[in-house]
Image: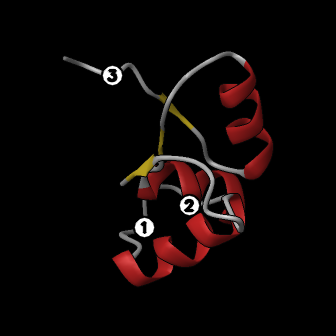
């Protein structure tokens, strides 16, 4: 079984994705760098991305894939 997912680079996008009925969202380093830093894909570390994911979903209610 496959689960369709949509990308979220911030909390607003995650909420919209949830409202549209998706079961999960994904976060990419490039998306985070573009949205938060206004930079191209700069090679964020997993630790850095995890910090942004915590800001996107502080309550841990979304299924987020990296």
Location of residue 48 in the rendering, given as x and y in whole percent from the top left corner: 48, 80
The reply to whether discs 2 and 1 touch (Cβ–Cβ < 8 Å) is yes
For label 2, the crowd category at 10 Å Cα-Cα, with few meaning under 14, some 14 to 19 and many 20 or more, is some
Please name the residue that numbered disc 2 is placed on.
Answer: 33
- Residue that extends furthest to the bottom in the rendered view of this protein: 47
Q: In this view, does 54 lie to the left or right of 30?
A: right
Looking at the image, which residue is at 43% across and 26% down? 5
Residue 66 against residue 6 in the figure, above or below:
below
CA–CA distance in space, label 2 to label 3:
25 Å
Location of residue 43 in the rendering, given as x and y in whole percent from the top left corner: 36, 69
For label 1, the crowd category at 10 Å Cα-Cα, with few meaning under 14, some 14 to 19 and many 20 or more, is few
Q: Earlier in the sequence, mark 1 or mark 3?
A: 3
CA–CA distance in space, label 1 to label 3:
28 Å
Q: Earlier in the sequence, mark 2 or mark 1?
A: 2
Q: Earlier in the sequence, mark 2 or mark 3?
A: 3
Q: What element carries label 2?
A: helix
Location of residue 62 in the rendering, given as x and y in whole percent from the top left corner: 58, 48
The residue closer to the viewer here, 38 or 45, is 45
Location of residue 61 in the rendering, given as x and y in whole percent from the top left corner: 63, 53
Residue 14 lies in quadrant: top right
Please name the residue that numbered disc 1 is placed on.
Answer: 42
Please name the residue that numbered disc 3 is placed on.
Answer: 3
The residue closer to the viewer here, 36 or 15, is 15
Looking at the image, which residue is at 75% across and 23% down? 19
CA–CA distance in space, label 2 to label 1:
7 Å
For label 3, the crowd category at 10 Å Cα-Cα, with few meaning under 14, some 14 to 19 and many 20 or more, is few
Which color scheme does this rendered protein use?
secondary structure
Q: In this view, does 7 lie to the left or right of 34?
A: left
Q: What element carries label 3?
A: loop
């Amino acid at each position: 079984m496959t689960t369709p997912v949509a990308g979220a680079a911030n909390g607003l996008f995650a909420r919209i994705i949830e409202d549209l009925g998706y079961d999960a969202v994904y976060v990419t380093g490039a998306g985070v760098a573009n949205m938060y830093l206004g930079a191209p894909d700069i090679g964020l570390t997993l630790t850095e991305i995890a910090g942004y994911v915590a800001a996107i979903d502080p309550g841990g209610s979304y299924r987020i894939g990296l």
